[in-house]
Image (cartoon, rainbow, N blue to C red):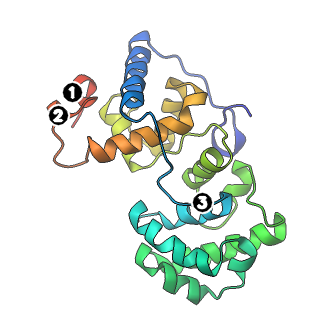
């Protein structure tokens, strides 16, 4: 599958200066040295349980999601079983993840659509995924990359913030950051690299109380704090 942007659009090519390209390559090597292995933070068994976990992760920590999903999946770990649960039952289980009224409705409805319109299988395309309730481009990108292995570059708040801090993007929007990073890094690295940046942001590069001199990347490349 060719590298794509939202809904299957080809990633636009961008002219990049040799200096910026070299910086990006060095940052990638630093991340590779620090995080040669990138386990997926959200516990899951298949594309469906990953999709539900990512929906639950909105404005919630991965740790909290991983505490709640075993309870939910004990009741229903496939779309057909989930659609048979009452929305209120789903809401009660996922309440600690926050936004439970909206998330429970989305999980129930996307489970119905997957069952009735996709034969019980999570669809393997951006367009179909983003048509599901509660599924935006970032969530679709996570599923496409981590469940199906297609090149995608999910951009969360860590990645958006660090790309601007390192001068890899101007930080004007999440969409712009995604396009800039896709232009800078080879498609075969995207699925791993987005996790490496997330891990790095949590360990070395917090939004507050950040000390540039102690950061393996910002000490070399930070353009803002």
Horizontal relation, residue 212 to residue 192: left or right: left
Q: Residue furthest top?
A: 18
Circles 2 and 1, Cβ within 8 Å, touching? The answer is yes
What x and y, as percent, mark residue 121? Answer: 77, 61
Question: Where does the N terminus fall, quadrant-wise?
Answer: top right
Query: Observer-nearest residue: 91 or 74?
Result: 74
What x and y, as percent, mark residue 205? Answer: 27, 41
Q: How far apart are marks 2 and 1 (CA)?
A: 7 Å
Residue under the point 72% across and 84% down:
84
Marked residue nearer the N-terminal end (2 or 3): 3
Question: Where does the C terminus fall, quadrant-wise?
Answer: top left
What x and y, as percent, mark residue 62? Answer: 42, 61
Horizontal relation, residue 220 to residue 195: left or right: left
Q: How far apart are marks 2 and 3 (CA)?
A: 34 Å
Circles 2 and 3, Cβ within 8 Å, touching? The answer is no
Marked residue nearer the N-terminal end (2 or 1): 2
Residue under the point 65% across and 47% down:
144
Q: Can residue 98 be seen in this view?
A: no
Please tell me in which quadrant of the rendered image residue 190 appears. top right
- Neighbourhood count class around disc 1 (C-alpha, 10 Å): few under 14, some 14–19, many 20 upward: few
What residue is shown with label 2? 214
Image disc number at residue 50: 3
Kind of element beneath mark 3: helix
Residue under the point 62% across and 60% down:
45
Image disc number at residue 204: none
């Amino acid at each position: 599958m060719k590298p794509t942007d939202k809904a299957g659009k080809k990633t636009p090519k961008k002219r990049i200066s040799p200096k910026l390209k070299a910086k990006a390559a060095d940052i990638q090597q630093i991340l590779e040295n620090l995080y040669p292995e990138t386990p997926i933070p959200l516990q899951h068994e298949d594309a469906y349980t990953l999709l539900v976990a990512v929906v639950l992760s909105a404005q919630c920590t991965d740790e909290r999601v991983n505490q709640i999903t075993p309870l939910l999946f004990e009741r229903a770990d496939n779309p057909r079983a989930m659609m048979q649960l009452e929305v209120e039952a789903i809401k009660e289980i996922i309440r600690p993840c926050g936004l439970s009224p909206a998330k429970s409705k989305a999980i129930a409805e996307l489970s119905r659509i997957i069952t009735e319109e996709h034969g019980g299988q999570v669809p393997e395309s951006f367009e179909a995924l983003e048509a599901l309730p509660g599924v935006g481009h970032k969530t679709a990108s996570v599923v496409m990359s981590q469940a199906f292995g297609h090149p995608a570059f999910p951009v969360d708040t860590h990645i958006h913030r660090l790309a601007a801090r390192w001068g890899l993007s101007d930080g004007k929007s999440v969409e712009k950051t995604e396009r800039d990073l896709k232009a800078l890094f080879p498609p075969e690295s995207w699925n791993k690299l987005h996790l490496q940046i997330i891990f790095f942001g949590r360990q070395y590069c917090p939004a507050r109380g950040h000390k540039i001199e102690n950061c393996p990347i910002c000490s070399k490349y930070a353009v803002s704090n």
